Amino acid sequence: TVAEGLTTREILALVAATEGLTGTTPGLSELGEGALLPETYHFSLGDARVDLIARMSAAQDEVLARLWATRKEGLPLKTPAEALILASIVERETGVSSERARVAGVFINRLNRGMRLQSDPTVAYGLFDENGRLDRPLRRADLSVDHPYNTYVHLGLPPGPIANPGLASIAAVLNPIETKDLYFVADGTGGHAFARTLAEHNRNVARWRRIQREQRAQ
């Protein structure tokens, strides 16, 4: 079983460690980020790892093509590749299934208005070490580091996906809910507080920071 939101590096490591398969996995450079569909895959003893990875890649291609064909009109996404990028951001932004379409709607609104996406997971992805990890919390100073995946610095989508999104996140991006929300921040319950205005968002941020202080005090 491949969980949604894993990087390609993490999926390859998972397959490499799975008993009952044979051979090696493809190289990371052969696949790229976002190319594999998170799902539960069945295999027979002795199946080749390269064949299992190929199945994951074909499944992602099929899902993306099928959902792209039924996408909502007027989206600021020119290609399936751009949809995959945004879906990977939605995947890493929320683990709450009921929020995906709303988070996608926020990012669609920001793209339509020419606003920066300002997504923390994209910043973290650009700071990963050679092992594909950022072994510390994101810092405020990180938000100003100029790298291609820093959506606080650069307008539009980053140059590629930041993870492998699942079917639900791809569907959310291609059929987002209509909302006037432009902001969201963690609410302390595992979900997010959404806002239409910066003033409202700032109040939500202040509430979240108060929750963080209380948690650290405990």
Image (cartoon, rainbow, N blue to C red):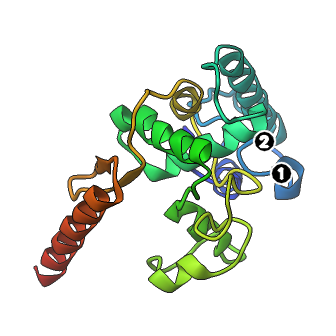
Q: Are marks 2 and 1 in contact (CB under 8 Å)?
A: yes
Residue 85 drawn above or below residue 115: above
Which numbered tag is attached to residue 24? Answer: 1
Calculate the distance from the C-alpha at mark 2 to the C-alpha at mark 1: 6 Å
Quick one: 209 or 7, which is closer to the camera? 209
Q: Is residue 138 visible?
A: yes
Which numbered tag is attached to residue 125? Answer: none
Q: Is residue 39 left or right of residue 94?
A: right
Q: Is residue 136 left or right of residue 156?
A: left
Amino acid type, callout 1: Thr
Residue 7 drawn above or below residue 203: above
Q: Is residue 5 left or right of residue 203?
A: right
Quick one: 63 or 19, which is closer to the camera? 63
Badge 2 density bin: few <14, some 14–19, many ≥20, Cα 10 Å: many
Query: How many numbered markers are drawn?
Result: 2
Q: What element does badge 1 sit on?
A: loop
Which residue lies at the image location 64% right of the left edge and 75% below the top edge? 127
Amino acid type, callout 2: Arg
Choose the circle earlier in sequence order: 2 or 1. Answer: 1
Q: Is residue 52 visible?
A: no
